[in-house]
Amino acid sequence: MYKILVTGACGQLGSVLVKRLRSKHGEHNVIASDIRSKPDIEELFIKLDVTDSNALEKVITKYQIKEIYHLAAILSAKGEESPLKTWDINIKSLLNVLEVSRLKNVKKVFYPSSIAVFGDHIDRNYTSQISCLSPKTVYGISKVAGENWCQYYFDNYGLDVRSIRYPGIIGYQSLPGGGTTDYAIDIFYKAIEGVEFKCFLSENTSLPMMFIDDAIRATIELMRAPKELIKTRSSYNISGISFSPAQIVESIKKLLPDFKITYKPDFRQGIAENWPSSINDSEARGDWGWNSKFNLDDITEIMIAELTKKNKIKTHNV
Ligand code: SER
């Protein structure tokens, strides 16, 4: 087995993906890297700023990396606080990954895109793979550019880059940071603490979402699919479920009937209104067999059970 590098390994997806890849390919074949450090990924962890191409090249050479999952990025809501910095980090890091991969003979690269690539002039219901991409956030603009750069490296250099447009990811392992879809995680923390949740989106704003297990499985299935099945080299739409704050509240109340929410939409409402409410992922289904498994009530049940467990451990240790 060859060596794999994960950037952004301390993030919401990265921390779970590293564990999953290690259990599949062996502890010592997966190098976790991030600009910050996190105590639970101690093994083979490297502090790495991917915007520094020399530092990246050294890691690729030293460990003879043949596959990269480039997850480091600034997300939608956080990105709006400093647009130029977000563009710089998101694009510089991707270009470094693509260029070093080309020069150092990396076999495969994974690039996470997002539903944030969509904006005006789309059909928000069941948005197609091939749609107008005119995002309103700097994060979305960087992801559209990133998708095109992936296509460019595939077309011109034959680099095997594969990509998914993730919906909002819901998981209990770590907190997300700076996304518009993050309310759908924070809400569970408040629910198990018995605290009223102040939602920054309005009641009926429906967005595409996915449970973290589905997102990780999609990533690994795409990366392991035979090369000839991968027909889209910009990024694949993938769909899990879609729900609004009102629907997630209904699901939570089946288990925690006293749960309370108030709505106080802020600038993130504007971001959400520009995104699809559901996704047509027929290309991913047809090309490499994608199929999601978790519905809203499954997710609610797991989130409440896992976060309650975590909370008990925390309370016990205090
Ligand atoms: N979850 C991301 C965000 O909200 C979308 O890809 O920014």
Image: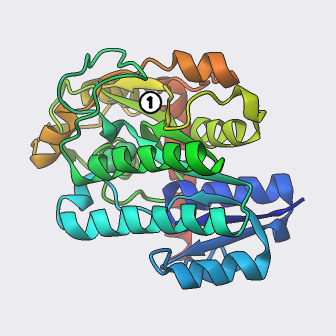
Taking depth in this image into account, of 318 and 227 the one nearest to the observer is 227
Q: Residue at x 71, y 36 (%)?
A: 221
How far across and how far down the image is residue 172, in percent?
Answer: 52, 50
Q: Do we see residue 149 in this rendering?
A: yes
Tell me where residue 25 sits by quadrant. Answer: bottom right
How far across and how far down the image is residue 145, in percent?
Answer: 36, 49
Q: Do we see residue 9 in this rendering?
A: no
Q: Is residue 87 above or below residue 54?
A: above
Taking depth in this image into account, of 225 and 291 the one nearest to the observer is 225
Element marked by disc 1? helix
How far across and how far down the image is residue 138, in percent?
Answer: 23, 53
Amino acid bearing label 1: Leu
Figure coloring: rainbow
Number of labels in the image equals: 1
Instruction: Tell me the residue that label 1 is attached to.
Output: 255
Q: Residue at x 23, y 40 (%)?
A: 135
How far across and how far down the image is residue 124, in percent?
Answer: 26, 19
In this rendering, would 265 be left or right of 149?
A: left
Tell me the quadrant of the picture where the N terminus can be found.
bottom right
Q: Is residue 262 above or below residue 83?
A: above
Q: Residue at x 66, y 47 (%)?
A: 158
